[in-house]
């Protein structure tokens, strides 16, 4: 083989992104910005910030929790909640197969981790998206976990922090993934406007699509990491639509800060301290409006409680109307939340996950 043939063969071989090489157990990686070779052990100790240029490389969800939450205080929510395949979607692979591969590779059930913990001794509710799981795409499980986290924070009066890293809505779930935008936004409306609580949105690279168009930009305080990619549509799509050349720093955190879409850009090394000081400042701020928790807010239970209720309902053969009555008695649901036993409809003002139990009967 000639030198030219060898070079051509090397050029055609697919290249693996640097942040994926480190997940395979390698010792070294390369900075995506300056190309400097970095020792992974030292890079993790430096919060995955390049020693040479200060570029912030990708972090997974567990690393972010470790850097923000005090050791031994993290209490996760809904770890067993995993997505289904309601549309039986298939492209080059079946959607179910893609899910299994992502779960095996990352050790997660879906693209978000939610729970509570202490941040410098301050109790907070937190949701952290993981871009390594199917590009952090938002499906029905991601939307449900974030909504449950918001509702728990509303009930307990906790500060809410959502760390966003997503490519947008998950196309394999169709309209079900798009509905999560409205569901999360509705839960945030109750949390912010009615309960009067404090929501901090932290945007990391990349934050795009339906996540940017919904809860990522609804924070009382919107923070970002340096040089984070933040936008809705892609740069090339916008250039082709407008027939104009966009600035070099377009859709970066610095560009958005200059145009008033962000409140602050905070380097990763100062992030925990900045969040702690911000929450303490908010706690002591005067003239805060006293909020309230609506009566329609429903607290979520654990998987074991849900399974216990299913078994109690299935213990005796009952007619549909009798089953409905038993569900209402067990869960102490208001009259009018269920309109028609046969059709399983629900009042628009209520988002009650307990009613999913009735579908299984």
Image: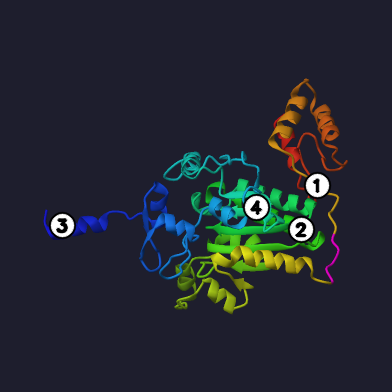
| Mark earlier in primary sequence (1, 2) | 2
Using the image as rendered, state which of residue 126 and residue 75 is in the foreground. 75
Quote the CA–CA distance across marks 4 and 2.
16 Å
- Residue furthest to the left in view is 2
Q: Residue furthest top?
A: 316
The residue wearing badge 2 is 191
Mark 2 falls on what kind of element?
helix
SS at mark 3?
A: helix
Q: Residues within 10 Å of mark 4 (few under 14, many from 20)?
A: many
Residue 347 numbered mark, or none = 1
Rendered location of residue 168, percent (x, y):
55, 57
Q: Position of residue 104 (x, y in %)?
A: 48, 40
Q: Is residue 120 above or below residue 230?
A: above
Is residue 288 on the magenta stretch?
yes
Which numbered disc flags the more N-terminal residue, 1 or 4?
4
Give whichever of discs 3 and 1 has the lower sequence position: 3
> Which region is colored magenta?
287-291
Q: Nearer the viewer, mark 1 or mark 4?
A: 4
- Binning the other alpha carbons within 10 Å of mark 1 as few (below 14), some (14 to 19) or many (20 upward) gives few
| Dot label at residue 68 | none
Q: Secondary structure at mark 4?
A: helix
Q: Is residue 275 above or below residue 116?
A: below
- Please give the residue where the numbered disc 4 appears in the rendered image: 180
- Which badge, 3 or 4, comes first in the chain's sequence? 3
């Amino acid at each position: 083989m000639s030198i030219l043939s060898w070079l051509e063969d090397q050029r055609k071989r697919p290249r693996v992104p640097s942040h994926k090489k480190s997940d395979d157990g390698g010792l070294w990686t390369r900075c995506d910005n300056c190309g400097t070779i970095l020792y992974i052990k030292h890079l993790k100790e430096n919060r995955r910030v390049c020693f040479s240029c200060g570029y912030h490389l990708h972090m997974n969800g567990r690393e972010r929790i470790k850097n923000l939450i005090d050791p031994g205080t993290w209490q996760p929510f809904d770890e067993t909640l995993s997505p289904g395949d309601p549309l039986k979607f298939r492209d080059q692979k079946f959607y179910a197969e893609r899910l299994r591969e992502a779960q095996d590779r990352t050790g997660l059930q879906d693209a978000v981790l939610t729970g509570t913990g202490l941040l410098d001794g301050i109790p907070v509710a937190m949701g952290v998206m993981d871009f390594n799981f199917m590009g952090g795409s938002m499906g029905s499980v991601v939307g449900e976990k974030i909504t449950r986290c918001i509702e728990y924070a509303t009930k307990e009066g906790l500060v809410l922090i959502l760390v966003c890293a997503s490519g947008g809505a998950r196309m394999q779930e169709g309209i079900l993934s798009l509905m999560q935008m409205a569901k999360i936004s509705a839960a945030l409306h109750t949390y912010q406007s009615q309960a009067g609580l404090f929501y901090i949105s932290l945007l990391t690279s990349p934050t795009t699509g339906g996540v940017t168009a919904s809860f990522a930009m609804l924070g009382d305080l919107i923070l970002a990491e340096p040089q984070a990619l933040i936008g809705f549509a892609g740069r090339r799509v916008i250039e082709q639509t407008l027939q104009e050349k966009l600035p070099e720093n377009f859709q970066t955190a610095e560009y958005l800060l200059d145009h008033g879409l962000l409140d602050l850009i905070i380097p990763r090394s100062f992030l925990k301290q900045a969040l702690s000081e911000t929450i303490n400042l908010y706690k002591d701020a005067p003239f805060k409006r006293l909020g309230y928790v609506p009566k329609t807010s429903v607290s979520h239970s654990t998987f074991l409680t849900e399974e216990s209720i299913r078994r109690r309902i299935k213990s005796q053969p009952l007619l549909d109307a009798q089953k409905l009555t038993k569900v209402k008695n067990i869960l102490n649901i208001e009259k009018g939340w269920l309109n028609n036993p046969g059709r399983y409809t629900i009042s628009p003002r209520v988002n009650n996950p307990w009613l999913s139990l009735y579908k299984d009967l």
